Amino acid sequence: MEDTLVQKESKVVTLMRQYSFVEEANKDPEVKEYFDMAYKAVGSYAKTAGGPAASGMSRAEERAIMPEITGIFPEDGRREFQESVNKYFKNLNTKIPPTGKKLEIALEDPSRPMGFTEKLPSGLPDPDSHINLPVNPTQYIIWRHAVGHPLCASDKDTAEKYQHMKFYIQDEGEIIKATSALNKLEDIARKEYFKIIEDGTKVTQVLTLLGVPNAKKLDAGTAELSLKGFSTIDDSVAEATNEKKLKTFKSVATDKELAVKYDIMQFISAGIFERIGARILIKESGDQVGINLKEAAKWMLDKSNVQLIGSFKAQLEEFGGGKMTSV
């Protein structure tokens, strides 16, 4: 039975099943009924291998909502509170009916952000101030949990594009998919992650530019987990750290000169180029390629350097670095 929706300034989304190509193509009513009877649920997930069950919410959201759900408050002890949150989401399993599950996600005061309305001089939330809570906390939690789930897409188009997606959010009102700037930034990073993940070459390029050692030697599973770590919020670190990480990931993943910069890193690894501070030099001659990676990429793209780059390419292949990807 569906939860009763509270009618206030209602904002409703529907958590939908994403049917496979075979399921969509089969029009036989009996077969469709068989597929519909299958148990499908949005279960627990972790953002990192071996990590705690993720909530999909920010720490501020957890502090505001979860005490009334679990009965454990942050004031009872940070560790006890976080353990109660982790346990709740480890056991969260939301069954999705064939017609979808409607969720009320409105806030009591839609003009203000979710959480405590005032802050202490230290910048931390004031626990004695008014809390702007969701109209229906349980359904809000299910929504936020689903938004962060690796098998749940933000919309049907995205779900159809990536075959591993099992669910999607149907949002006819075109309301926001996240409640904070950091969550929005994570949504952007996740979209880039899904664009990259099926291209092994690009995964290697991105991880290399993000500073992962020997990225091209990683097996597909390890590379995927590493890439996912760069594109998702880590609740164990400060918001500023997460913001910097997500912005860096987006910048690298969308860089039009990604392949060229990756080749430069290959040259450095092979000892053809060397890096002194930010400067990049040709090791044998000492000639400067660029004062930084960006300028070195311009040098690589200069047609007058094609012949010299060709000789470097031959050295790289002899070194065993593999073929270049940009020139």
Image (cartoon, rainbow, N blue to C red):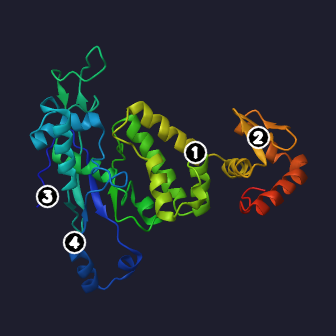
Q: Amino acid at mark 2?
A: Ala
Q: Quadrant of the C terminus?
A: bottom right
Q: Which residue is mark 1?
A: 211
Q: Is residue 134 visible?
A: no
Crowding around mark 3 (Cα neighbors within 10 Å: few <14, some 14 to 19, many 20+) is few
**Badge 2: how crowded within 10 Å, few (<14), some, or many (20+)?**
many
Indicate the secondary structure of the residue bearing disc 3: loop
- The front one of 14 and 220 is 220
Helix, strand or loop for disc 4: loop
CB atoms of marks 2 and 1 within 8 Å: no
Report the mark closest to the observer, 4 or 1.
Answer: 1
Choose between 163 and 78: the one closer to the eye: 78
Dot in front, 2 or 4: 2
**Disc 3 residue type?**
Glu
Answer yes or no: is residue 69 visible.
yes
Helix, strand or loop for disc 2: helix
Residue 209 % position (x, y): 61, 46
The residues tagged by marks 3 and 1 sit, at their Cα atoms, a distance apart of: 47 Å
Is the C-beta separation of discs 3 and 4 under 8 Å? no
Q: Earlier in the sequence, mark 2 or mark 1?
A: 1
- How far is disc 3 from disc 4 in space, using C-alphas? 16 Å
Amino acid type, callout 1:
Gly
Q: Which residue is mark 3?
A: 2
115 shown above or below 282: above
Disc ID at residue 296: 2
Crowding at mark 4 (Cα within 10 Å: few <14, some 14-19, many 20+): few
